[in-house]
Image (cartoon, helix red, strand yellow):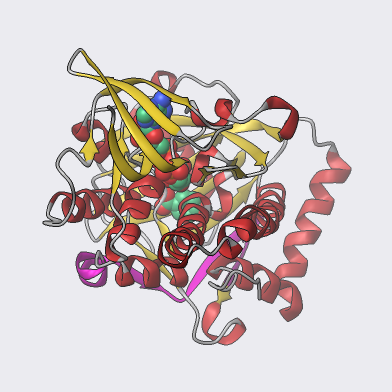
Amino acid sequence: MPARVPVGIVGAGPAGLLLAQLLARRGIASVVLERSSREHVESRVRAGVLEQPTVDTLTAAGVGQRLAREGIVHHGIELRFGEAAFRVDFASLVPGRNITVYGQREVVRDLIAARLADPAAPTGHLRFEVSDVELSGLESDQLVLGFTQHGQREQLACDWVVGCDGYHGVSRGWFPRAEVRQFEHVFPFAWLGVLAAVAPSSQELIYSRHERGFALHSMRSPELSRFYLQVPPGEDADQWSDERIWSELCTRLETVPGWRLRTGPILEKGVAAMRCFVHEPMRHRRLCLAGDAAHIVPATGAKGLNLAVADVRLLSAALAGWFETGSETGIEAYSAACLRRVWRVQDFSCWMTRLLHVSPAADAFERRAQLAALDAVSQSRASATVLAENYVGLDASGALA
Ligand code: APR
Ligand code: PHB
């Protein structure tokens, strides 16, 4: 007889870990199966901008203490283009709403610590270095997850299974092909992400559209800065010496008279594609998807983590309804509610990407029109408000603002 658990979760990224945590707060046990080691999961550097509803959800989940201490609240962002600089001021455009800069790596560390400290969780509820995860019984609602850990094949019977295994995971493949539609778009450029041991050169994030390509100045702490450079797709990060990185960042960011970029040791660098992806639907019978397993948005709007949190916020409430009262209402609405938000965020992230990147195929006309679009954001309160409203995040309820 396989062991039993109410919810089996594949993947211990932010989506899987937060889902396990939110379910635990409602008294629902789960087991999380993760392919990588704990060290690997806790060391991945990802984006670091949290919308207010994300902060609220993490706080309500009991993992908000360090975030409240170390997270940096930002009330605006800066856009640079040509020789112009424009501050998108959240306080005046979207009063009372802001963002918090706190690395996703820290979110994951806080969640793992909280899960491992949960006295009510069943033994072996968070398993790292698990391989060959398979699902059977989907069409009969008799779900069984098979997996291997420490050379031992095991089985886990579940009422529900949730695929939180990211873009490269296996769980999407468990949906019947005939029921699925997938949408994909890849931009003709990538991002070189850089973590540097140097104090930020600005209090707020700077998004720069430069003729040589986009650059972003972000941060992690008073001692750590995070940068991104637009590079060709498939670029090899090793082609980028520290010297070359700083020279290119200076060229693309030092466009405002008198403003200088601080430089320092580079701790880490890596290249990520600029990709859009949506898998519809996000539920089939008792199998659900959440986070990157179901959707990828281009990183320009920093929305990936926020979307994952919005998914699991809805899903934890829907599953609680099912376990507590047998209600199917939440779970029936789950996929459509998530997808509506996903497509809105997809649209915004693509818009912001096109606004700020220089596409290699863009001709002189398109480049001038792009500058006019940036000019409009800086001159029209209505245009700036659209940016600000989307940047700080759509409302937290299932229905969008
Ligand atoms: N079996 C078990 N675990 C798997 C498998 C598998 N076959 N395939 C992938 N995983 C694990 C990965 O090792 C990873 O730890 O699933 C996890 C997925 O985590 P993320 O990729 O972080 O995805 P998600 O939790 O949806 O996070 C969404 O965080 O990771 C960022 O860019 C992402 O910002 C987005 C947000
Ligand atoms: C980050 O800090 O990693 C970051 C910030 C803003 C973005 C994307 C990434 O738009």
Furthest-right residue in view? 365
Quadrant the C terminus occupies: bottom right
Quarter of the rendered structure image containing ligand 1: top left
- In terms of depth relative to the viewer, which is nearer, 314 or 348? 314
Furthest-top residue in view? 151
Q: Position of residue 366 (x, y in %)?
A: 84, 44
Q: Position of residue 243 (x, y in %)?
A: 36, 30
Residue 250 higher or lower than 257, as above or below: above
Residue 249 higher or lower than 93, as above or below: above
Residue 147 higher or lower than 83, as above or below: above
Q: Is residue 69 left or right of residue 141?
A: left
Quadrant the N terminus occupies: top left
- In terms of depth relative to the viewer, which is nearer, 379 or 17? 17
Q: Quadrant of residue 204?
A: bottom left
Reply yes or no: does residue 46 show up in magenta.
Answer: no
Q: Quadrant of residue 38?
A: top left
Q: Residue at x 39, y 19 (%)?
A: 238
Q: Residue at x 57, y 65 (%)?
A: 391
Reply yes or no: does residue 77 show up in magenta.
Answer: yes
Q: Is residue 28 left or right of residue 53?
A: left
For the question of whether residue 218 can be seen, the reply is yes
Q: Is residue 65 left or right of residue 56?
A: left
For the question of whether residue 203 can be seen, the reply is no
Which contiguous range is marked in magenta? 64-87
Q: Position of residue 213 (x, y in %)?
A: 62, 40
Q: Residue at x 34, y 61 (%)?
A: 22
